[in-house]
Image (cartoon, grey):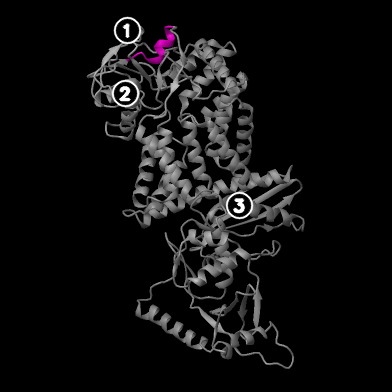
Amino acid sequence: MDTIVSADDIEFGVFRLDRRGGRLMRCDESGALTTLSLGTRSREILYVLIDRAGEVVSRQEIMDAVWGGVAVEENNLTVQLSALRRILDEGRTGGSCIETVPGRGYRFVEPVRQTTRAEVAVAGTQNSKPRPGTRSLSRREKWPWIPVAVAAAIFVAAVVVWGGGRRDERRVPPRLSLVVMPFRNLSGDHEANALADGITADLTSDLARVSQVTLAAAPSTNNNTGGVLDPPRVGRSLDVRYVVEGSVREVGKTLRLDVQLISTETGTELWSDRFDETLAESDASLEHVAARLRTGLRDTLIGIESARADRERPDAPDAFDLVLRAQAIMLRSPDRAQERQVAELYRRSLARDPSYMPALVGSAYFLTDRMSPWQVFGDMRQAENYALKAREIAPTAPEPAHVYMYWLKSVGRCPEVIELGRQFGRTDPEGIRSIVGIASQLGQCLAQTGHAEEDIALQQQAMESDPRSRWTFDRFRAIGYDQLLLGRYQDAITSLQRSLAINPAFGSSWRYFGVAAAYAATGQIDQARRVVAEANRLWPYFTVRSVDPNYSPNPVYRAQLRRVQDELRLAGARDHADENADFGVPSDRELHRAIGLTPKDALGVTTVGTVDLSTLRDDAQVIVIDTMTNSWGQSIPGAFGLKFVGLGGDFSDEAQGRLRSKMSELTGGNLHRPIVAMGWNSEHFDGRNLALRLTALGYSHVYWYRGGREAWEVAGLPETDIRVEDW
């Protein structure tokens, strides 16, 4: 019965896996078995791959089997695989026994065979040293097939080298793949080992949060050895393109740090940094060091890989290449002029791979960013769809969380932003500071719920964590707005001017208006008016009344905004648009982006002014629809609020279908009911877009109130809480 196969014992290469005992053993030249140290997760991953040896197993299948549905970062799998490869591939001359299949998963390529019970019994008597009086089985006796396999391998190698034109068949390591080697302690002080280890651990943890990076687990080494690093050998053994090495030297209360990024393919140093850090508080200093290194390494890697992709695949970039190009452009100081190019790169990346998470995140971000305030209904919906799909693909990754929070904040759903941000903070407290967007969206929503002080603290912590971030200007912008809300006017001027000095181009008009309000509040009227003139040049559509709470009902925040409005009026900012202004714009039948100078009429629609509307609404049959642009939650008595109904698009989009259903409900299907379409003011197309949509639906008595809710408020006419409709 010794021929019965036991499924609990498996051999591959020079390894024996005892699944029942959870042991991985290696056979040396004498035939003795040595039990190897293998972590629980790595062992479970090995089980999954061996059970399907020769097949491609997706990352998600492995994570589901090993982590059992628990939400973990995908880089946990990468690190465990790297640790497993380091053990299994030691001494191998070919590629890894765990092959990466780009875009699909992993495959265990080593031949696997199950052992017989008799073989298990023999193996069970073997230890790392044979007992006295016994003879260890020789390697040839234990694995008689090894010489055959070696001979076959030599034959195959000869065919490849000589018959195949001597081509280099080594597998190319993954793009953006690296390992952080343990930092060396050059202080000669054993206590400084903990400092070097702490920097290594913090930097590894920070890089694990960077999307697209494949991070390998580093081999354990003594910080005091000072051995010479062999990058090509590290690259071959860990299957990475880059290696990070560094050293620390503690001199009194100063930490001197040197770090290099090296190519494992050429051994060339690609980037280095050297700086001194005061060790007043060791934990905070380590975070500061790790954040600075993370930023420098991330930006360098993206730039290098993007340039490499342009050289190697200039005419046939894949989804990964296109995202790298977009990210490389954004590494420069953010500029609105670059947005169209970046957004197009993300669009092309999605066209190649509709499920590529970084492309989904990038597309959602730019659709949200350029549409805030929203302009086109379809873009608003598409941004939400991309963000939700990205979260579905990577539910615990920070980037999808950030972009979804950005979208939620832009549509006025701050309570959800705060809840999502708090959840993320509980699972990744360091990420809440290191991921710029998460801190930004959470902070702005905290301010909109009357907690500007909390936002200031959050932004300051984020700047301390990453003082060299290219988004530092946005941190100062947020702090400056908070200080303005809190009445700390001189601090607001300093923060906003510092933001403008760092990046004068990105959304600068709103920062100028903030500076002007603070100047006016401190009695510096001349300076305030000069700043307002510059702000008006940059954004001519601004009116004081357009400052709105973004649907926030918080009374503290609303009172703060009312005070800012008064300060802007004092600074000379324009209070409202002229409802009767003739901008010389020809009329057409198009649905325009929401903001812009409007014509005086709309084809097939009757244009009315404030006086006309006051009389018209006496008719009990009239239905007033408010687009809720710049809404404070009030409107003409009896008006229905359809949020975002005035956005641009076309007459066959989703908005048109939704509007048809809602209007049928409100009118009882009567196409002859008089309907007033009301937007914000004469410099917004929202009311006109709504009017044209209604006529396209077949309504015969449609009126466009061109002055909009702003003109109604200027006239001092009555308002009541608006009836917000779900459509």
> For the residues carrying marks 1 and 2, which lies nearer the camera in this image?
2
| Residue 577: quadrant of the picture | top left
When the figure is inspected, residue 412 is found, relative to residue 343, above or below; the finding is above
Residue 98 in view, yes or no: yes
Please name the amino acid that badge 3 sits on: Ser
* Residue occupied by mark 3: 205
Q: Pointer 1 and pointer 3: residues touching (CB < 8 Å)? A: no
When the figure is inspected, residue 404 is found, relative to residue 114, above or below; the finding is above
When the figure is inspected, residue 561 is found, relative to residue 443, above or below; the finding is above
Work out how far the residue at label 1 is from the one at label 2, CA to CA, in angstroms. Answer: 25 Å
Please name the amino acid that badge 2 sits on: Gly
Dot 1: within a 10 Å radius of its alpha carbon, few (fewer than 14), some, or many (20 or more) residues? few
Under circle 3, the secondary element is helix
Q: Nearer the viewer, residue 291 or 607?
A: 607
Residue 466 in view, yes or no: no
Please name the amino acid that badge 1 sits on: Asp
**Which stretch appears magenta?**
705-715
Q: Which label is found at residue 668? A: 2
Work out how far the residue at label 3 is from the one at label 2, CA to CA, in angstroms. Answer: 60 Å
Q: Earlier in the sequence, mark 1 or mark 3?
A: 3
> For the residues carrying marks 3 and 2, which lies nearer the camera in this image?
2
Q: Nearer the viewer, residue 17 or 26?
A: 17
Find out whether residue 712 is within the magenta segment: yes
